[in-house]
Image: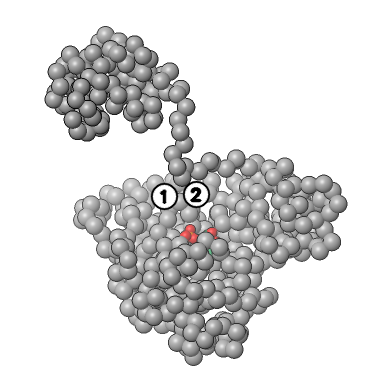
Amino acid sequence: MKGTWATSASLDLHLELSGTRPRAALEAALRDAVRSGRLSAGTPLPSSRALAGDLGLARNTVADAYAQLVAEGWLDARHGSGTWVAERAARVPRARPPGDRVAPAPVRHDLRPGLPDVSAFPRAAWLAAARRALTVAPARDLIGYASPRGLLPLRQALAEYLARARGVVVTPDRIVVCAGFAQGLELLCDLLRAAGKRTLAVEAYGHEAHRRIAAAAGMRLAPVPVDDHGALLADGAGLPARTGAALLTPAHQYPLGVVLAPDRRRDAVDWAASSGGLIIEDDYDGEFRYDRQPAGALQQLDPERVIYVGTASKTLAPGLRLGWVAVPESLGGAAGLARQSFYRGTGVLEQLTLAELMTSGAFDRHIRRMRTQYRRRRDELASTLAASLPQLGLAGISAGLHALIYLPGHGPTEEQIQSRAARLSVAIHTLGAQAIIVGYATPASHAYRPALEALAELLAMEPDEQP
Ligand SMILES: Cc1ncc(COP(=O)(O)O)c(C=O)c1O
């Protein structure tokens, strides 16, 4: 007897029946499905007549198997209401599937870097944009396999926005839409390797996950020093001879928070021109600059050597998984990138909705509103620290959604701060060099003040205090 599908009563039920005794096989298969949790409490089962028809068994065989399982407590049945998986059967403890991670305990004050205030996601504007997009989109955009480069309305909207707001030199045909910066980086690493470039320079500290992505794509990593003026990417700066590309965060270095200084920007593109290298510009939070006009994208200094990558993860929400790459012709353009690996593009509904959000002006309005809010939060962080802990140095605050707080050498260590943070239910990151990284955009606005107070309490810890 083989596994089979029962499809009766509008229910699909897969059962593996083995052995030569049909009733015993059916009972064992149902017991196993309930025990493993595959059939959960309350799941209705097909009628004995329907299941018998689907499995090619006598109806009595199925009815007897059901009756036996009801008697054993696996199933419940009531005349006229059918048969379903019993409540108490669900109480049998389930083994955790391999790889199923335990969810981290929720923290009261979430100041981890990397997230915008997702409670401020513009739900009403997104819904309105989705409704409009869905109403007018041609069926081929909605149902067919779309071009892996991304849908034209979004690439047009992005080209307009990136040129206007970030100074990117780009046309829609140079853009590839991808699932966030992370996927853009993965595709780019494949493309770089195909172009014979095997070493990627990465900023000191930098984003650990991005290094892992590049390394998994087969790139060798070479560190670039970062100081108060940003990354030092220049001829003679100690890079390995055959460094083919560099990954930079010019608008707001992650995690140190420094903005790449004008002469360093020049040095970087000069390095690319003289070495034949390419620069991947990670413009993850470039929209958020507080004290003066945002610095435009580095890409505008040399659009053939700087590959611009943007994301909706900070302006809207990381869960959207939307990012975009402006690919130079020298790298085969958008077509070259979209051909990489088995890339099939991203979901069209999100693409069409974002295009509509951008062309309607709602995207710009949301960014302006959030920029004002984040600037206010940053100022509150600065004034709280200045009032209660003036000995601590705050850095990286002219842009972005996170700041660095340097801990004095004679004060508590990062480890002591982290264990106290756990007790106060505060989530922060540490730099690994006597500093903590605070994501001040992460909490909802009502939760920000209490989070700041908890942070101040945490940082007021004496070094000799037991953590
Ligand atoms: C340095 C940096 N780049 C890019 C991103 C965005 O990545 P993604 O677009 O894959 O969400 C983040 C998010 O935290 C980041 O910290």
Vertical comparison of 192 with 22: above or below: below
Vertical comparison of 84 with 210: above or below: above
Does the rendering let one see residue 161? no
Q: Earlier in the sequence, mark 1 or mark 2?
A: 2
Image position, residue 133 (x, y; %):
31, 52
- CB under 8 Å between callouts 1 and 2? yes
Image position, residue 170 (x, y; %):
39, 75
The amino acid marked with disc number 1 is: Trp
Vertical comparison of 454 with 230: above or below: above
Q: Quadrant of residue 196?
A: bottom left
Image position, residue 64 (x, y; %):
23, 13
Q: Which residue is mark 2?
A: 121
Image position, residue 287 (x, y; %):
53, 65
Q: Extreme bottom residue here?
A: 274
Q: Which residue is mark 1?
A: 126
- Within 10 angstroms of label 2, few (less than 14), some, or many (20 or more) residues? some
Q: Quadrant of residue 65?
A: top left
The amino acid marked with disc number 2 is: Phe
